[in-house]
Image (cartoon, helix red, strand yellow):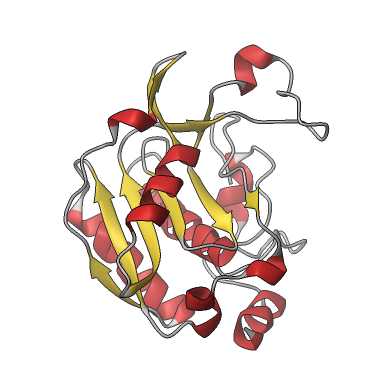
Amino acid sequence: MRFYLMPLLLLLFYGCNNVPREVQQRKYQVGIQPIGNVNSEQIELIQNALKDEYGFETVVLPVMAPPQRAFINVKSARYRADTLIRILRDSRPDSIGIIFGLTNKDISITKYGAKGEIKKPQSTYKDFGIFGLGFKPGTSSVVSVYRLGKGKTLRSRLKKIALHEIGHNLGLKHCPDKSCLMTDAVESIGTVDAAKETLCENCKAKIQKK
């Protein structure tokens, strides 16, 4: 799920057989971690979405200042999403199964090709602005509202992207069903908008088996 040719995520693969115990058990709260100035209505939207789709209770954690060590200024002032999810993972309270970062700051990654090289043109992909990023599977993810538009459009995209990232935390792969919120956006905001705000039945079944 992406905007202006920006991807929703670059997954960091750890292998589906290495799902953390906290994620396997799924008997926990999800911690919503505001990073910087975050709209309380957007936090509430995510809380309701996680409850409705995954049955997760949530807790809102104290605001975190945008970490300076994640800051980068190549094309513009941004924060590295891969650094952010590591910081979140390492700061996760024991009572929290998944920690979900939400920020209004622009976030980015470096996008690599199949052989591990930076995709070409490097001027585009070395510092590539994104919507969100999550470990697959894992205990942390982050989403930025920076590129999501305004009003109803922003709320719909934020809901889908948040659920998508948490789905990856739970071990879900991209789904071939283009209507499923786990579909690969393929760098197109149209894919985000065309997807439903819910998992397809196949993805729901995979979650229920965990």
- Which quadrant of the structure image shows residue 205? bottom right
Locate residue 29, reporting x and y percent.
34, 76
* Image quarter in which the C terminus is found: bottom right
Above or below, 86 against 174 in this view is: above
Locate residue 202, reporting x and y percent.
72, 78
Left or right placement of residue 195 versus residue 31 in this view: right
Left or right placement of residue 32 versus residue 171 in this view: left
- Which quadrant of the structure image shows residue 190? top right
Q: Residue at x 25, y 65 (%)?
A: 44
Q: Is residue 68 visible?
A: yes
Q: Between 176 and 98, which is closer to the camera in this rendering?
A: 98
Q: Residue at x 68, y 80 (%)?
A: 206
Image mark count: 0
Locate residue 145, reporting x and y percent.
36, 42
Q: Between 11 and 201, which is closer to the camera in this rendering?
A: 11
Above or below, 24 against 129 in this view is: below
- Which quadrant of the structure image shows residue 110? top right
Above or below, 49 against 25 in this view is: above
Q: Residue at x 54, y 60 (%)?
A: 164
